[in-house]
Image (tube, helix red, strand yellow):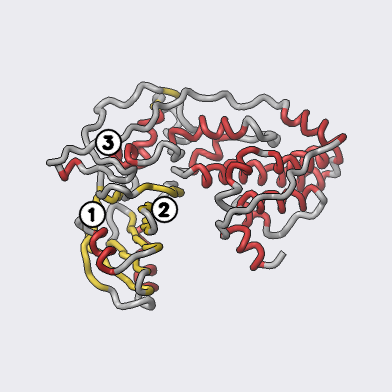
């Protein structure tokens, strides 16, 4: 496989459907049945449907979001009572049980929480939110605005790099000093000065002009954690949703030996595609590691079991749900087939994000 082909598989977002979903047969079917008989994770209590906000017309301060095409308003002062122990490591051992909503608030408080205060803008892609990096993309018709944030210590390097794009033009975004850089006539970015440990860069996509970009920058606002979470579409998997959503996906996947769902706890907040990739990728990586271990140990039965599990990836519902949106499933299937056939690609960790 060439680097160009791998890049296409990983980055190409054009729809692609496999011609045939291969099925296991004979002994492989029996092995897979044994694997799938492994007890699954217990589900956790469901959190309430994420609420929307309704803004009072006279209250611009209450403007939490036009992210979902609705406008902001009052919020609950008491979190829902959906208490459970929470993901391993969040909170730390010994801490009292908290609700999924409280866990989400804790995660959101550490991030920039910028929204577009204009109807019609929808959050369509969310990923990251783990540690100090993340991305959220808003769309409205034929325009998109991607907000990326990074640790503040990287600000100067990014700023110096953008100086090769154009001369910076001073502006203000969400009451914070910022610099605009122009790549092309309809391709611009605004880099905000660091605040609270991170800095944000806003990048245009689609049909923009400089006047429309300048106008939107005046509508970018910073909100509190509760308003930010309320503005996200309900399909976004936030930290409090991780265990429930992971259990739903994993119910259809063969569990690798010793698989620990807590490895997914630091996935942050993600749209369904990114979260599906996190779960399916982790399972695939662990089965490859098991295949390598068994092959090195001369454990022929375990090799066959791992190969059967990897071939079964062609039947994983989560990958078929993702396949119209991007090519990550194609990467999983190609790598899984190669390993099952006895050839471990040198690039599999990079390709899968192991």
Residue 268 drawn at (x, y percent)? 45, 43
Which residue in the structure is indicated by mark 3? 53
Q: At numbered mark 1, what does the secondary structure look like: helix, strand or loop?
A: loop
**Which sits earlier in the primary sequence, circle 3 or circle 2?**
3
The one nearer the camera, 155 or 145, is 145
Q: Could you classify mark 3 by the number of other residues whose Cα lies within 10 Å: few (under 14), some (14-19), or many (20 or more)?
A: many
Which residue matches tag 1? 219
Distance from disc 3 to disc 2, alpha carbons, whole Å, reads 22 Å
Q: In which quarter of the image is the N terminus?
A: bottom right
The residue under label 2 is 135
Q: Nearer the viewer, mark 3 or mark 2?
A: 3
- Proximity of marks 3 and 2: CB atoms separated by less than 8 Å: no
Distance from label 2 to label 1 (Cα)? 19 Å
- The picture places residue 193, in percent across and down from the top left corner, at 27, 62
Q: In this view, does 308 lie to the left or right of 331?
A: right
Q: Which mark is residue 293?
A: none
């Amino acid at each position: 496989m060439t680097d160009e082909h791998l890049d296409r598989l990983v980055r190409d977002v054009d729809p692609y459907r496999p011609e045939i979903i291969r099925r296991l047969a004979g002994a492989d079917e029996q092995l897979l049945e044994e694997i799938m008989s492994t007890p699954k994770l217990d589900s956790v209590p469901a959190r309430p449907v994420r609420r929307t906000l309704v803004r009072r017309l006279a209250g611009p301060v209450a403007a939490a979001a036009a992210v979902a095409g609705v406008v902001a308003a009052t919020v609950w002062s008491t979190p829902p009572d959906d208490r459970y122990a929470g993901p391993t490591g969040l909170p730390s051992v010994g801490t009292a049980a908290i609700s999924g909503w409280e866990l989400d608030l804790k995660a959101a408080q550490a991030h920039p929480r910028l929204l577009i205060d204009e109807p019609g803008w929808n959050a369509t892609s969310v990923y990251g939110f783990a540690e100090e990096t993340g991305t959220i993309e808003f769309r409205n018709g034929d325009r998109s605005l991607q907000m990326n944030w990074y640790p503040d210590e990287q600000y100067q390097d990014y700023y110096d790099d953008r100086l090769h794009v154009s001369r910076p033009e001073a502006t203000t975004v969400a009451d914070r000093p910022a610099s605009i850089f122009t790549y092309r006539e309809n391709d611009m970015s605004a880099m905000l000065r660091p605040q609270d440990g991170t800095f944000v860069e806003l990048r245009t996509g689609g049909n923009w002009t400089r006047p429309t970009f300048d106008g939107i920058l005046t509508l970018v606002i910073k909100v509190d954690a509760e308003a930010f979470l309320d503005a996200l579409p309900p399909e976004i998997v936030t930290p409090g949703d991780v265990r429930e959503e992971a259990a739903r996906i994993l119910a259809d996947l063969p569990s690798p030996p010793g698989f620990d769902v807590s490895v997914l706890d630091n996935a942050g907040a993600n749209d369904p595609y990114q979260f599906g990739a996190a779960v399916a990728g982790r399972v695939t990586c662990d089965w490859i590691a098991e295949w390598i271990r068994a092959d090195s140990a001369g454990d022929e039965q375990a090799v066959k079991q791992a190969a059967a599990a990897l071939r079964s990836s062609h039947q994983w519902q989560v990958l078929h749900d993702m396949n119209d949106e991007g090519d990550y499933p194609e990467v999983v299937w190609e790598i899984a087939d190669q390993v099952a056939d006895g050839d471990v690609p040198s690039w599999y960790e990079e390709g899968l994000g192991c």
